[in-house]
Structures are given as structure tokens and as C-alpha cells.
């Protein structure tokens, strides 16, 4: 809880500093490095230090994202959510190398195509926004699921706190509406004017795959969320290589 509160404080403080550093929203949107500009205005001697920290943090974030995503793909493939081939580990390094490639190679392809169609900044911003909205939708549905569960528990005679199980999730759902409202407004410059269509296609693909998985393998479909996070283990399928140990946290 302390980490959450402290991280939230840093986000709010950083956002406030950037807003104060720019006189208008267009000037902020057109700046290629707004945090660097803010540092040059507020603390000029430390502006170069901030640049180095920013590059380091971005690189670290990419490494963590690749590691986490490959781990999720590995767990899902091991339990049948994805093709079993993606559950293989490298014979020498004991890492889920195919799961890593399954995430990194399509990402590089999208980045290359986006950079060819638009400039690098626009491509990275557009693709990152589409993916982030998918995460926002996931978090919103998670909050909605908690509200539904509260009513189910109440129907079975089990009492749960209405504050933590009902009020807080509903506030979370309301907060999740703002990113969609801000990004789906009309009159935005290309390619952001196509953002609603791109997000709709992404959501439709995810929903279609979930429906197919639920129909073909209902046991896996019911626990898909926990399976990909490695929280539960489903029944092993015949022929599954149970002798292959999962990659350790250190190796990943």
C-alpha cells in the first residue's frame, strides 16, 4: 500500500509539473520531450540528468514488459490457452524463448510498418494508445466483475463490504471512462481519428478468441485469466511434456 501511495504521489507531482511548464495544451502536445522541457524551465542544471534517467527508465520498462509478457504467454501455452509450442524453454538458458519471440517479433513488425506509414513518434504513440486502452478495458471489466460478484454473494446470503466490493469498484469504472472519452472524441488528427476503429478491431479479436476457447475447451476458458498468470494449473493434456520444468524467475 505504501508503494502504491508513493507511486501515485510521484505521478501526480510529475503531471502537475508538466502542466505548469506549458502555457497551453497544444504546446504540450507538440513538444517531443515535454518532461525535458519542464526540467529545463524549472531545474536547468539537472536537465541532462533527467534525460539520462528518462532513457534508463524507458529501457528498463521495455525489458520488464518483455519479460512479463513472455511469462504470461508461456504460462498460457503451458496450460492450453495458446499453442503448446510456445511453452518450450531454451535447452541451454531455460528461458521461454519462443514465447518471447511471439511477443517481440510482431511488436517489431508493427513498429516498422507504423514508422514507414507515419513518423516514429506518431507510430509509437498511436500503437501504445491502442494497447493501453485494451488494458484500461481489462481493468474496467475487472472492477465490474467485482460488483457482479458482490451481488452474487449477497444472493447466497454472504455479506461483503459494500465499500470495498461495490463503491470502490464503481468509482474505478467511472475513472476508466475518461481515457476512452478523451481518445474517442471527434476531430482528432490522423491517425488518432481512426483510434475507435482500431480499438474495436482489437477488442473484437480478443472477444472472438475468448468465445472460441470457451467453446472448444471450457475447462481452460473458465480459468484462462488465472492460468496465464500462473496462479492455477489445469489438468494436463495427454502427451504434454511434464518433464520440462518451468523457467525460474532468475532465468527469465
Image (cartoon, rainbow, N blue to C red):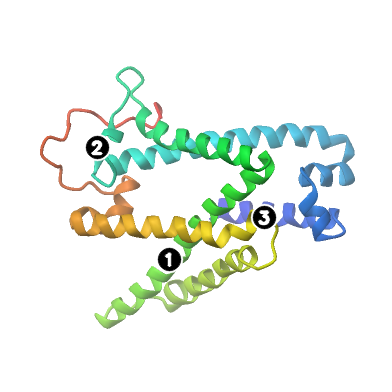
> Which residue sits furthest left?
238
Compared with 102, 171 (above or below) is below
Give the quadrant of residue 144. bottom left
Q: Nearer the viewer, residue 193 or 88?
A: 193
Q: Residue at (37%, 34%) from the top-left corner? A: 99
Question: Disc number at residue 190?
Answer: 3
Q: Which of marks 2 and 3 is in front?
A: 3
Q: Nearer the viewer, mark 1 or mark 3?
A: 3
Compared with 193, 247 (above or below) is above
Give the quadrant of residue 142. bottom left
Q: Residue at (12%, 35%) from the top-left corner? A: 239
Tell me the SS state at disc 1: helix
Choose the circle earlier in sequence order: 2 or 1.
2
Compared with 117, 30 (above or below) is below
Disc 1 + disc 3, Cβ < 8 Å: no
Residue 105 lies, in percent from the top left, at: 46, 33
Q: Quadrant where the C terminus lies?
A: top left
Disc 2 + disc 3, Cβ < 8 Å: no
Tell me the SS state at disc 2: helix
Identify the residue position indicated by label 1 in the image: 141
Q: In this view, does 58 lie to the left or right of 169?
A: right
Choose the circle earlier in sequence order: 2 or 3.
2
Q: How crowded is mark 1: few (under 14 residues within 10 Å), some or many (20 or more)?
A: some
Amino acid at each position: 500500500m505504501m508503494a502504491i501511495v508513493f507511486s501515485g504521489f510521484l505521478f501526480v507531482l510529475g503531471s502537475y509539473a508538466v502542466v505548469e511548464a506549458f502555457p497551453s495544451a497544444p504546446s504540450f502536445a507538440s513538444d517531443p520531450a515535454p518532461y525535458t522541457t519542464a526540467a529545463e524551465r524549472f531545474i536547468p542544471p539537472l536537465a541532462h540528468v533527467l534525460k539520462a534517467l528518462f532513457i534508463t527508465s524507458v529501457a528498463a520498462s521495455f525489458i520488464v514488459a518483455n519479460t512479463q509478457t513472455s511469462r504470461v504467454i508461456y504460462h498460457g501455452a503451458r496450460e492450453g490457452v495458446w499453442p503448446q509450442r510456445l511453452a518450450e524453454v531454451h535447452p541451454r538458458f531455460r528461458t521461454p524463448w519462443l514465447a518471447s519471440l511471439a511477443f517481440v517479433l510482431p511488436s517489431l513488425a508493427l513498429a516498422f510498418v507504423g514508422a514507414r506509414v507515419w513518423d516514429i513518434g506518431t507510430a509509437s504513440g498511436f500503437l501504445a494508445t491502442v494497447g493501453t486502452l485494451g488494458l484500461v478495458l481489462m481493468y474496467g471489466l475487472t472492477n465490474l466483475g467485482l460488483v457482479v460478484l458482490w451481488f452474487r454473494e449477497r444472493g447466497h446470503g454472504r455479506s461483503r463490504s459494500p465499500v470495498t466490493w461495490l463503491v470502490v469498484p464503481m468509482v474505478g469504472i467511472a475513472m476508466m471512462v475518461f481515457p476512452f472519452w478523451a481518445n474517442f472524441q471527434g476531430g482528432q488528427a490522423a491517425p488518432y481519428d481512426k483510434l475507435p476503429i482500431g480499438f474495436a478491431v482489437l477488442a473484437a479479436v480478443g472477444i472472438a478468441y475468448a468465445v472460441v476457447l470457451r467453446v472448444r475447451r471450457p475447462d481452460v476458458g473458465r480459468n484462462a485469466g488465472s492460468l496465464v498468470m500462473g496462479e492455477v494449473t489445469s489438468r494436463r493434456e495427454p502427451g504434454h511434456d511434464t518433464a520440462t520444468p518451468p523457467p525460474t524467475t532468475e532465468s527469465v
